[in-house]
Amino acid sequence: MALDTGLGATLTAIPGSWTGNLVGVDLHTSTIPVVDASHLGTTTYREKLVGDLADPGQVTLRMHFQGTTAAPTIGTTGTLTITDALATGESTAANWSGTAIITSVNHGSREIDQLKSLEVVVDWDGYTGPTFTAAT
């Protein structure tokens, strides 16, 4: 198994019609609720059950922003696909894909000697994916 860095990861599909030079991606953390099933007869430890529905989480995209492109709009829905760089020995790269909603846009700051930045938070909507496709 070859190990590789995140360099070369791309957004191959994204809700809305905007682009930017991707500099970082924080992938989602999926969670599921835990239901407290403890009662007055419970002793020593709380009793817990797994909840019914998992939350697929959010993805944070960090990028350089060019003012000549359309800015992302909160509430926009569509397909999000994040494709890893092709690692040594792979013929197809791994990816995460599913339908998502843009829920937050931070237009960053404007500073001397700093590139314009943009941070976009996208929530997987749970209708389609997120689905992981392994590299081959």
Image (cartoon, rainbow, N blue to C red):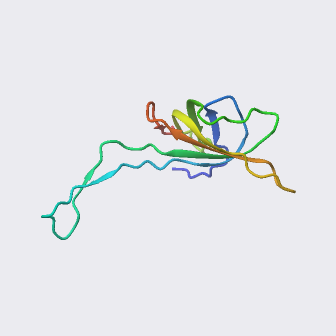
Q: Residue at x 56, y 52 (%)?
A: 3
> Which image quadrant for residue 12?
top right
Q: Nearer the viewer, residue 41 or 117?
A: 41
> Which image quadrant for residue 82?
top right
Q: Residue at x 63, y 37 (%)?
A: 11
Q: Nearer the viewer, residue 114 or 131?
A: 114
Q: Can the viewer see residue 66 in this picture?
A: yes
Task: Give x and y (percent) for residue 131.
Answer: 46, 36
Q: Residue at x 56, y 30 (%)?
A: 77
Q: Is residue 132 left or right of residue 115?
A: left
Task: Give x and y (percent) for residue 32.
Answer: 36, 48
Q: Residue furthest front?
A: 40
Q: Residue at x 21, y 56 (%)?
A: 37
Task: Give x and y (percent) for residue 21.
Answer: 74, 42
Q: Is residue 82 left or right of residue 38?
A: right
Examine the rendered structure and indicate whether residue 74 appears above or below residue 115: above
